[in-house]
Image (spheres, rainbow, N blue to C red):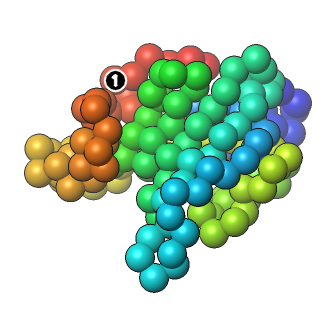
Amino acid sequence: MGAKEGNLVDAVTSATGGRLLFSGAALETEWHLADAYIYRLFDYHLRGTAEDKGHTGRVWVKNEHHVVWRDEDVLATSPDLIALLDATTGIPLSTRGDVVPGRSVLVFAMPVLDSAWRTEQGTQLLGPRHFGFDFDYVPLEDRPVRR
């Protein structure tokens, strides 16, 4: 990781209490549904760079970033907050076409701001099982730290 990228990571983690999950370059966007009047459903596929070189990343999106994997390991899920940043500028990237093949990205997560989302009712509404995944929500701070 270069000095500029390291400073960006330090600044974001310090400001949010979150952590860097994956450094990579976008390979493709796998669309499942792109009807703007309903919702956007797709996966970003990433090739690892820096400390993640040799690994793959994936981010599942249903209008927002909801699940992040490194290889086959789940790193974070909603209701915790997941954001992709441009690795050079630090600008947050939207789900509206900002993550294009070749773009270098940093995938971050931070604990959800309102603890109500971490209750049983909250995770029923915004946890991974709500979206059809066969795994439970685990708070970000209870997951192993890679960095």
18 or 139, which lies in front? 139
Q: Residues within 10 Å of mark 1 (few under 14, many from 20)?
A: few
Q: Residue at x 72, y 47 (%)?
A: 28
Instruction: Indicate the secondary structure of the residue bearing disc 1.
Output: helix
Could you tell me which quadrant the C terminus lies in? top right
Q: Nearer the viewer, residue 123 or 119?
A: 123
> For mark 1, what is the residue?
142
Q: Quadrant of the N terminus?
A: top right
Nearer to me, 14 or 61 = 61
Horizontal and vertical percent position of residue 100 = 78, 56
In which image quadrant can residue 97 be found? bottom right
Q: Is residue 64 visible?
A: no
Residue positioned 44% across, 17% down in the render: 144
Asked whether residue 62 appears in the rendered view, the answer is yes
Q: Is residue 41 left or right of residue 9?
A: left
Q: Is residue 140 above or below residue 33?
A: above
